[in-house]
Image (tube, rainbow, N blue to C red):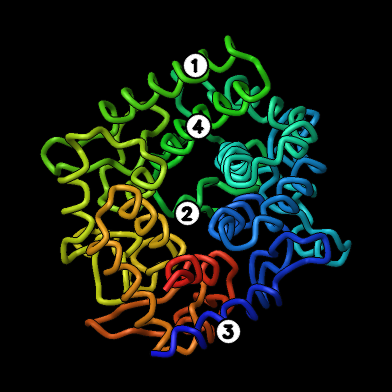
């Protein structure tokens, strides 16, 4: 495969998604607008290649950061938006939502993670000063509003009955994940650990030593609790979530792979976690499934219940690279290139049925995957940019 040609095409695809303000719209033809989670993750993926994307993303999200309580839009002070539709005609498609719409549990910790990563990569202290008020407000939201019951975990329960029921990356307007709220998703707790660490580093840069120490202590406390409360000894794996009664949703899913990327996994848990992620009911020649085929509600065409998402695989790739497990990381990279070779693109999501790849970007099986998605293209570009 001509990797230089693949890189050129990925750059072209990403430039098609670049808004005039410099951030990446989520995808095309659907979701061609600003998303908190999507735009932040794609900016993170592109940080070493074009840090201006992260700068633009952080600025536009800070400009629309929540500042009041509003149940219709699910806005709260300091919260980073889920989605903004700038045109009235676009907003009319979801008449029961207020825009910007803030129904996301992870966009705010991701804002802190990307802000820290950007400053660390660029040394841009001017940007840190510019964003400091927004960073402080985002951190306050995590502590004050994101943790509904004071147990240290970030949890969600929708405020708008017409809004998103699930508000992690496997979001949706119905309870397709079968978890009663308030919901504490496993990967979100990893993001929280990383966000506390990020704030600690940024506060230290601003000369706020006491605040930095408190944030580090919070990160350590949540990391210990996460590795205790979400671990399933019999399965040697992390559960998908804690529900509102603090019961485990015990499905075997891709979500715990994200914990590796934010370095939230206890040392003794790494080996069994990685081994389980590559078991036959999760791993395919085209990447990691969202949901294990051994689960009773597995659906190879299910949006979050068995399909394969390239950006989800990027999190596992990043985690393996951080651990120095290059051969396993290369398996992810090769799987994504295999998708590219067979489909001629790297779409939002895809299906593998009886070992064969199926393109879902033409509306088959009621899915309607985007053929162009920022965090898919940016994730693959990050995997092959230095080869």
Q: Does the residue at mark 1 contact the one at mark 4 (Cβ under 8 Å)?
A: no
Q: Does the residue at mark 2 contact the one at mark 3 (Cβ under 8 Å)?
A: no
Mark seen at residue 243: none
Mark 4 or mark 3: name the one nearer the start of the chain. 3
Q: In the rendered view of the protein, which quadrant contains the N terminus?
A: bottom left
Query: In 3D space, how far apart are the residues under numbered discs 4 and 2 (Cα atoms)?
Result: 14 Å
Check disc 2 and report the residue beneath it.
170
Q: Position of residue 303 (x, y in %)?
A: 44, 66
Q: Does the residue at mark 1 contact the one at mark 3 (Cβ under 8 Å)?
A: no
Q: Position of residue 317 (x, y in %)?
A: 36, 59
Density class for disc 3 (Cα within 10 Å; few <14, some 14-19, many ≥20) is: some
x 64%, y 15%: residue? 208
Mark seen at residue 9: 3
Query: In 3D space, how far apart are the residues under numbered discs 2 and 3 (Cα atoms)?
Result: 28 Å
Tell me the quarter of the picture where residue 41 sits. Answer: bottom right
Q: Which residue is more in the foreground, 212 or 155?
A: 212
């Amino acid at each position: 495969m001509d990797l230089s040609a693949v890189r050129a095409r990925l750059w072209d695809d990403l430039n098609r998604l670049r808004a005039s303000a410099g951030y990446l719209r989520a995808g095309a033809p659907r979701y061609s607008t600003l998303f908190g989670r999507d735009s932040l993750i794609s900016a993170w993926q592109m940080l070493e290649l074009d840090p201006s994307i992260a700068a633009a993303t952080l600025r536009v999200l800070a400009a629309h950061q929540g500042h009041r309580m509003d149940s219709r839009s699910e806005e709260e002070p300091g919260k980073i938006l889920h989605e903004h539709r700038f045109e009235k005609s676009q907003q009319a498609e979801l008449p029961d939502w207020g825009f910007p719409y803030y129904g996301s549990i992870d966009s705010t910790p991701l804002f802190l993670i990307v802000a820290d990563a950007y400053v660390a990569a660029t040394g841009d202290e001017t940007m840190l000063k510019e964003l400091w008020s927004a960073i402080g407000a985002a951190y306050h939201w995590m502590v004050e509003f994101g943790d509904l019951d004071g147990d240290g975990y970030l949890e969600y329960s929708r405020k708008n009955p017409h809004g998103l029921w699930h508000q992690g990356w496997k979001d949706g307007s119905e309870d397709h994940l079968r978890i009663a709220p308030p919901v504490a998703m496993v990967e979100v707790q990893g993001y929280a650990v990383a966000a506390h660490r990020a704030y600690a580093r940024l506060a230290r840069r601003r000369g706020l030593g006491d605040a930095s120490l408190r944030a580090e202590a919070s990160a350590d406390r949540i990391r210990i609790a996460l590795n205790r409360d979400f671990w399933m000894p019999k399965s040697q794996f992390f559960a998908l979530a804690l529900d509102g009664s603090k019961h485990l949703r015990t499905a075997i899913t891709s979500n715990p792979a994200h914990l590796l990327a934010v370095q939230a996994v206890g040392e003794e848990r790494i080996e069994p976690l990685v081994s389980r992620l590559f078991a036959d009911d999760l791993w395919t020649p085209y990447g990691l499934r969202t949901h294990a085929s051994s689960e009773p509600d597995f659906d190879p065409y299910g949006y979050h219940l068995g399909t394969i998402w390239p950006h989800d695989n990027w999190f596992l790739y990043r985690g393996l690279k951080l651990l120095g497990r290059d051969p396993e990381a290369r398996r992810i990279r090769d799987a994504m290139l295999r998708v590219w070779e067979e489909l001629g693109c790297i779409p939002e999501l895809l299906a593998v049925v009886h070992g064969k790849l199926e393109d879902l970007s033409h509306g088959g099986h009621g899915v309607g995957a985007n053929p162009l998605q920022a965090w898919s293209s940016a994730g693959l570009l990050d995997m092959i940019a230095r080869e």
